[in-house]
Image: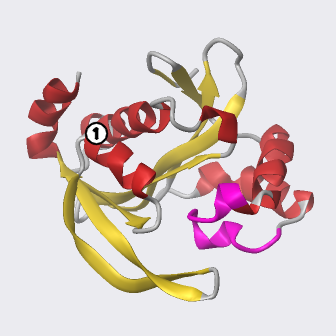
Amino acid sequence: MFLEGNEVYFRPLSVEDAEDFYQWACDREVVKYSLSSFSYPKSKYDLETWLKNINNDAKTFSLGICVKDSDKLIGYAGIASISTLNKSGEYFILIGNKSFGGKGIATETTQIITDYGFNTLGLHRVELTAYNLNPAAYKAYEKAGYVHEGVKRQSGFRDGKFHDKVMMSALATEWQSNKQNIE
């Protein structure tokens, strides 16, 4: 266990997680709004190779999300594009197991990973984007303490159309007061 919340705990990802990622990647509903790398079919071998190297990138911090009462891996989250010069990064999350959607896990995960980014990685700013078609995502981010910054017009392509993405961020200088208001 690397980090712990009320409902979930976080652990490093490993090659043994390839089967779970493969199942998630094959479910178009799960990966519809996720990173572009999940928009195309992946083989188990591709996912194993990716998982072997996931912890080797100094600019990305990734952890598996596990449910406490079952020890089941249900997704992953982290911070990518970490800039030590700018003290910033980009938050990401994938809840791969659909049965855990709408239970507050995304909000709790967002709070814990963002807090880690500020208080352990020493970041000043963590940003993210969410498709405007996915209001559940940006509502979870708002609840976690992120603030709307604007809209990236037609910056994502899904279902044969271009769609806007909502831009949001959290700043370390605002985080403690936001975190206290959330709890």
- Would residue 62 be visible to someone looking at this image? no
For this orientation, the residue located farthest to the top is 69
Question: What is the x, y in percent for residue 4?
Answer: 47, 20
Q: In the image, what residue occupies the spot 49% across and 31% down?
A: 105
> Which SS class for mark 1?
helix
Residue 104 vertical placement versus 58 (above, below): above
Query: Neighbour class for label 1 at 10 Å: few (<14), some, many (≥20)?
Result: many
Q: Is residue 83 left or right of residue 21?
A: left
Q: In the image, what residue occupies the spot 45% across and 31% down?
A: 104
Which of the two residues, 152 or 83, is positioned nearer the viewer here? Answer: 152
- Would residue 35 be visible to someone looking at this image? yes
Q: Is 165 contained in the magenta span? A: no
Residue type, label 1: Lys
Question: What is the x, y in percent for residue 166?
Answer: 32, 68
Q: In the image, what residue occupies the spot 80% across and 43% down?
A: 20
User: Where does label 1 land, which residue?
Assistant: 143
Question: What is the x, y in percent for residue 118?
Answer: 26, 41
Q: What are the residue bounds of the magenta stretch?
A: 29-41
Q: Is residue 36 left or right of residue 148?
A: right
Q: Is residue 25 left or right of residue 32?
A: right
The quadrant of the picture occupied by the C terminus is: top left
